[in-house]
Image (cartoon, rainbow, N blue to C red):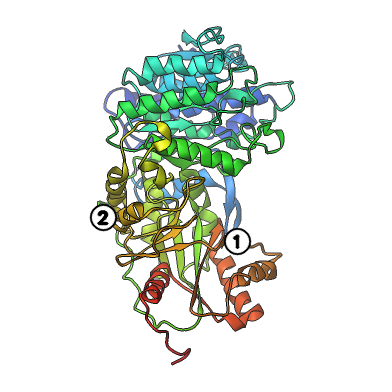
């Protein structure tokens, strides 16, 4: 119940949305300004973001109605608001006939959209996992989340908002079932929502719970709201995804619950993945949004308090997810924030997109051919956030670039794909990143599958990739990761030739470098060029060059600009001209490499 009157403009909005819906009006809620006007209370700020993101998920379920202004980021011209950027872009196209009405009042926002939620669910700060359980409940039961005894209660009450609590998770979980209150909470939610078919059959959310919400305790360091990943919840709540956050390692105890029985987290995670697999009967891949919270828990990084390296922990998660036919949309901390996906995921896509005409055949010469894999874009958050800085770089178009934009990200950020295809130059080429249309370990789609007893899913993987590759005119996979699980056997190589016939780049090895007409090549190294060490990066790359030519090298770059690539290309000719560097587009590179494998004799240079 809302007691205060709301601004007259929103009375008009309410009148429109109560009867015949005004599909052309979108509230642009300035959450940044709202939080800035609040008391300096990180708990209040966190709870406001969590509630607002959940409301977005409910309101935007079938159409864009509520967009927030929240995320700051970098562009070619300096710091900007990323949400302003995408709002402006979309108003130039898809949303050109829509009106964005700005709002900063939580009370007005809740009033406007009061018919979209059924009340509130309280989560228990003594059991941080209940914050994630509450997110699952939000999507299924249309309830808004709030922590027990949150300062948000008083803040909203002062604004005239009466919070009607319909469900409480307080004092509900004490470890009676598993010895772990956290695991008890997730298994309760599994039985109530996952096993009963109330959650999405092919979507889950792997986001950090409320572990950071411990005011006054060591390790409480979450005034960094964008990296809380809470702004990402809206898309998953809109789609009724199941939320979780559990340690994957079976032989260590999680830092957030060190007294639980050894392996309880992993056992619970397996039960969730098994239930999700049964939910879709193994007929499709589940997308899991999120990532291990490597700087906060579950790894040996600084305050995280775990025992394993962050990359090794990542690989262990991916291995287990792969076993249960799940791919990761990898919102890694640091660049994880993605607001408004629940609204903008409604952006329509064409049935078919076309890349530019493939480049003409080039002569094979005794030179060093280089492919720069421009990644990592296996995260919708990373991709959406970095378009203003990297894609809009004015140098783009001057040199050939292999953009590793995973096509499955189009589910969550279709607006990005529409924009990049609309603005691509003939020097912009799109290839899949790790490990195709989704990040998994393909070696774990067959065989024992870590003892899971599940049938092979290789044919399902081929069909899954073909759908995305066909829609976006992809035929190259730039990087396949198998983590701890070895070289790629010929059977899986043959599967990749069915959707990636022009070439495949590999983290590890493989059985044959040429399968049919599809070449496979292992990446040489990851390179991290910086403006203050151009020569060091050039020297590092040159260290892989050999006297025997032709030679073919793939280097993986992460979040680098076209300007940096052009700078490095010039530096290689300046510092190491003896190797005769040729920086290729992906089609020329793999064509020359294939012809080399087939035994074609190179022409004399310049012939």
| Mark 1 nearby-residue class (10 Å; few <14, some 14–19, many ≥20) | some
Q: CA distance from mark 1 to mark 2?
A: 34 Å
Q: Is residue 592 above or below residue 65?
A: below
Question: Residue at coordinates 54% horizontally, 21% vertically from top-left?
Answer: 264
Q: What secondary structure is found at the residue carrying circle 1?
A: loop
Question: Residue at coordinates 55% horizontally, 33% vertically from top-left?
Answer: 31
Quarter-of-image position of residue 61: top left
Relative to residue 49, is residue 36 drawn left or right? right
Q: Is residue 8 visible?
A: no
Q: Earlier in the sequence, mark 1 or mark 2?
A: 2
Q: Which mark is residue 408?
A: none
Query: What percent of the width, then of the height, locates residue 366?
Result: 48, 83
Pick out the residue farthest to the left: 351
For this rendering, which residue is in front, 573 or 105?
Answer: 573
Relative to residue 306, is residue 122 drawn left or right? left
Quarter-of-image position of residue 238: top left
Q: Which mark is residue 352?
A: 2
| Mark 2 nearby-residue class (10 Å; few <14, some 14–19, many ≥20) | few
- Number of dots carrying numbers: 2
Q: Which mark is residue 527?
A: 1
Q: Is residue 484 above or below residue 453?
A: below
For this rendering, which residue is in front, 307 or 132?
Answer: 307
Relative to residue 197, is residue 248 drawn left or right? right
Q: Is residue 347 above or below residue 55?
A: below
Q: Quadrant of the C terminus?
A: bottom left
Q: Quadrant of the N terminus?
A: top left
Query: What percent of the width, then of the height, locates residue 347?
Result: 34, 44
For this rendering, which residue is in front, 289 or 518?
Answer: 518
Query: What percent of the width, then of the height, locates residue 355?
Result: 33, 63
């Amino acid at each position: 119940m809302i007691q205060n009157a709301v601004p007259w403009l929103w009375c008009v909005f309410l009148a429109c949305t109560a009867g015949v819906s005004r599909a052309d009006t979108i509230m642009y809620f300035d959450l940044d300004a709202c939080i800035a006007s609040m008391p300096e209370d990180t708990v209040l700020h966190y709870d406001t973001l969590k509630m607002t993101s959940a409301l977005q998920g409910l309101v935007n379920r079938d159409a864009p109605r509520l967009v927030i202004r929240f995320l700051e980021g970098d562009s070619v011209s300096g710091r900007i608001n990323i949400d302003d950027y995408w709002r402006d872009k979309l108003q130039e196209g898809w949303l050109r006939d829509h009106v964005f009405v700005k709002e900063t009042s939580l009370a007005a926002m809740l009033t406007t959209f009061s018919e979209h939620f059924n009340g509130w669910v309280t989560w228990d700060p003594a059991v941080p996992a209940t914050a994630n359980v509450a997110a699952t409940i939000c999507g299924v039961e249309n309830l808004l989340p709030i922590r027990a005894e949150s300062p948000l209660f008083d803040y909203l009450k002062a604004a005239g908002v009466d919070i009607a609590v319909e469900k409480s998770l307080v004092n509900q979980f004490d470890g009676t079932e598993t010895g772990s209150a956290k695991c008890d909470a997730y298994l309760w939610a599994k039985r109530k929502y996952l096993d009963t078919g109330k959650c999405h059959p092919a979507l889950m959310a792997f986001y950090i719970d409320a572990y950071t919400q411990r005011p006054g305790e060591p390790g409480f360091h979450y005034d960094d709201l964008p990296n809380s990943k809470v702004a990402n919840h809206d898309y998953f709540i809109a789609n009724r995804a199941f939320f979780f956050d559990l340690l994957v390692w079976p032989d260590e105890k999680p830092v957030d619950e060190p007294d639980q029985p050894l392996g309880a987290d992993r056992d619970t995670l397996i039960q969730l993945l098994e239930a999700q697999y049964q939910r879709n009967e193994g007929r499709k891949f589940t997308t899991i949004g999120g990532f291990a919270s490597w700087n906060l828990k579950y790894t040996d990084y600084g305050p995280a308090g775990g025992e394993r390296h962050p990359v090794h922990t990542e690989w262990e998660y991916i291995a287990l997810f792969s076993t249960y036919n799940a791919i990761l949309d990898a919102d890694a901390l640091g660049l994880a924030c993605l607001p408004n996906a629940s609204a903008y995921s409604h952006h329509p896509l064409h049935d078919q997109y076309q890349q530019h005409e493939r480049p003409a055949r080039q002569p094979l010469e005794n030179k060093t051919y280089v492919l720069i894999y421009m990644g990592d874009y296996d995260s919708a958050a990373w991709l959406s956030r970095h378009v203003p800085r990297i894609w809009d770089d004015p140098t783009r178009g001057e040199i050939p670039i292999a953009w590793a934009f995973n096509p499955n990200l189009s589910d969550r950020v279709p607006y990005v794909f529409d924009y990049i295809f609309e603005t691509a130059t003939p020097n912009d080429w799109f290839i899949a990143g790790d490990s195709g249309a989704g990040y998994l370990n393909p070696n774990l789609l067959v065989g024992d599958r870590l003892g899971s007893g599940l049938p092979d899913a290789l044919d399902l993987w081929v069909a899954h990739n073909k759908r995305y590759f066909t829609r976006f005119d992809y035929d190259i996979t730039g990087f396949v990761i198998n983590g701890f699980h070895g070289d790629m056997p010929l059977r899986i190589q043959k599967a990749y030739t069915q959707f990636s016939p022009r070439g495949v780049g590999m983290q590890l090895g493989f059985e044959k470098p040429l399968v049919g007409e599809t070449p496979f090549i292992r990446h040489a190294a990851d390179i991290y060029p910086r403006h203050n060490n151009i020569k060091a990066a050039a020297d590092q790359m040159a260290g892989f060059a050999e006297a025997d030519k032709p030679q073919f090298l793939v280097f993986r770059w992460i979040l680098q600009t076209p300007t940096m690539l052009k700078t490095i290309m010039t530096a290689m000719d300046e510092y190491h001209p003896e190797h005769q560097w040729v920086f290729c587009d992906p089609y020329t590179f793999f064509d020359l490499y294939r012809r080399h494998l087939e035994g074609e004799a190179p022409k004399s240079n310049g012939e």
